[in-house]
């Protein structure tokens, strides 16, 4: 794999994006150098267990030129692999400021969620209400889950009136599969960050978390194993810093009754 690394500077802050395996990436980061981790791992568990129609959920997406026929390589979410991932997250997170947000689907929460408690102090399970229903042969899915935890510290979130149900519309016809609204990451960072904090995302995808970090005047460091994901994310960040335009999400997907929480 030909590694790609791109560094952007804005308002005396730095955005550092790399093409790398998530574990190797985390191992390259110094101890206690990150204030917040916000991430949406590409779990393989649900794809291995749940099949809809003729194909696997993520496996149906295709990337031209990919030998595997997938958009991206999934994170093998065995317990051993996940513990290595969490151990590295704990090492890089600052003990005084460290907050972590990990996104889960229903299967991965049941299979892996309890392991997070071995490494972090779990404070909340946040529900992301996507407003529009998704696929399903039984009860149709309309939500995802976000586990919020601290790295052994008692640092509070900015505003204790924040709810634990967030209503942001899902993105339809996205250029990148499983692309999350910027507002989902912005809510995490807005609740936990101070200006100048460093935000980390080891599963960068389309770069929504990087855009959210910029909107909150934070430094950012992130990676993805997919060359195409990194290319899309770096182009997106470059365009946003230069022109203030998000070329992968043209409009806000926040619900009207919720906007006051993030202002």
Image (cartoon, helix red, strand yellow):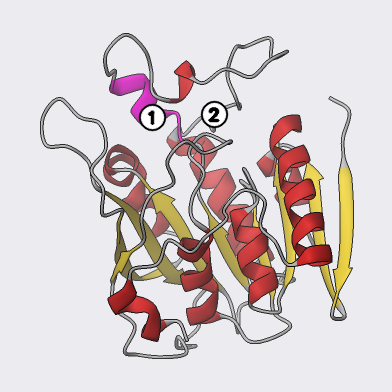
Point out the tag, 1 or 2, that comes first from the N-terminus. Answer: 1
The stretch drawn in magenta includes residue 114 = no
Mark 2 lies on a secondary structure that is: loop
State if disc 2 and disc 1 touch (CB < 8 Å). Answer: no
Around disc 2, counting alpha carbons within 10 Å, would you say few (fewer than 14), some (14 to 19), or many (20 or more)?
A: some
Q: Residue at x 36, y 44 (%)?
A: 112
Asked whether, in this view, residue 1 is left or right of residue 159, the answer is right
Counting from the top left corner in percent of width and height, residue 9 is at: 88, 69
Q: Quadrant of the N terminus?
A: top right
Q: Is residue 19 above or below residue 201?
A: above
Residues drawn in magenta? 43-50
Q: Nearer the viewer, residue 204 or 176?
A: 176
Asked whether, in this view, residue 143 is left or right of residue 184, the answer is left
Q: Residue at x 49, y 88 (%)?
A: 155
Counting from the top left corner in percent of width and height, residue 246 is at: 66, 57
Counting from the top left corner in percent of width and height, residue 175 is at: 58, 36
Q: Main secondary structure of the magenta part?
A: helix
Q: Which residue is mark 2?
A: 74
Q: Residue furthest left?
A: 138
Q: Which residue is mark 1?
A: 45
Q: Is residue 57 above or below residue 102?
A: above
Q: Using the rendered view, name the quadrant where residue 88 is placed.
A: bottom right
Q: Residue at x 74, y 83 (%)?
A: 196
Question: Does residue 184 show up?
Answer: yes
Mark 1 lies on a secondary structure that is: helix
Asked whether, in this view, residue 42 is left or right of residue 17, the answer is left
Q: Nearer the viewer, residue 166 or 4?
A: 166
Q: Using the rendered view, name the quadrant where residue 64 is placed.
A: top right
Q: Nearer the viewer, residue 190 or 182?
A: 182
Q: Using the rendered view, name the quadrant where residue 123 is placed.
A: bottom left
Question: Does residue 28 show up?
Answer: no
């Amino acid at each position: 794999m030909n590694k790609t690394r791109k560094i952007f500077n804005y308002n005396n802050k730095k955005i550092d994006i790399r093409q790398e395996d998530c574990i190797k990436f985390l191992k390259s980061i110094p101890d206690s150098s990150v204030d917040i981790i916000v991430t949406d791992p590409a779990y393989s568990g649900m794809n291995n267990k749940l099949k809809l129609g003729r194909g696997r959920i993520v496996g149906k997406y295709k990337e031209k030129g990919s030998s595997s026929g997938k958009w991206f390589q999934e994170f093998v979410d065995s317990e051993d692999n996940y513990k290595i991932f969490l151990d590295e997250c704990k090492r890089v997170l600052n003990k005084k400021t460290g907050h972590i947000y990990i996104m889960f689907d229903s299967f991965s929460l049941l299979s892996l969620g309890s392991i997070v408690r071995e490494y972090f102090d779990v404070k909340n399970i946040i529900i992301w209400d996507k407003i529009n229903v998704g696929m399903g042969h039984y009860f149709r899915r309309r939500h995802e889950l976000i586990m919020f935890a601290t790295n052994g510290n008692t640092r509070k979130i900015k505003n204790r009136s924040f709810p634990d149900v967030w209503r942001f519309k899902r993105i339809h016809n996205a250029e990148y599969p499983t692309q999350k609204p910027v507002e989902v990451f912005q809510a995490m960072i807005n609740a936990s960050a101070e200006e100048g904090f460093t935000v980390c995302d080891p599963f960068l995808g389309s770069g929504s978390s990087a855009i959210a970090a910029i909107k909150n005047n934070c430094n950012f460091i992130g990676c993805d194993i997919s060359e195409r994901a990194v290319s899309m994310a770096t182009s997106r960040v470059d365009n946003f810093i230069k022109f203030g335009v998000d070329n992968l999400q043209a409009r806000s997907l926040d619900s009207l009754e919720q906007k006051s929480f993030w202002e």
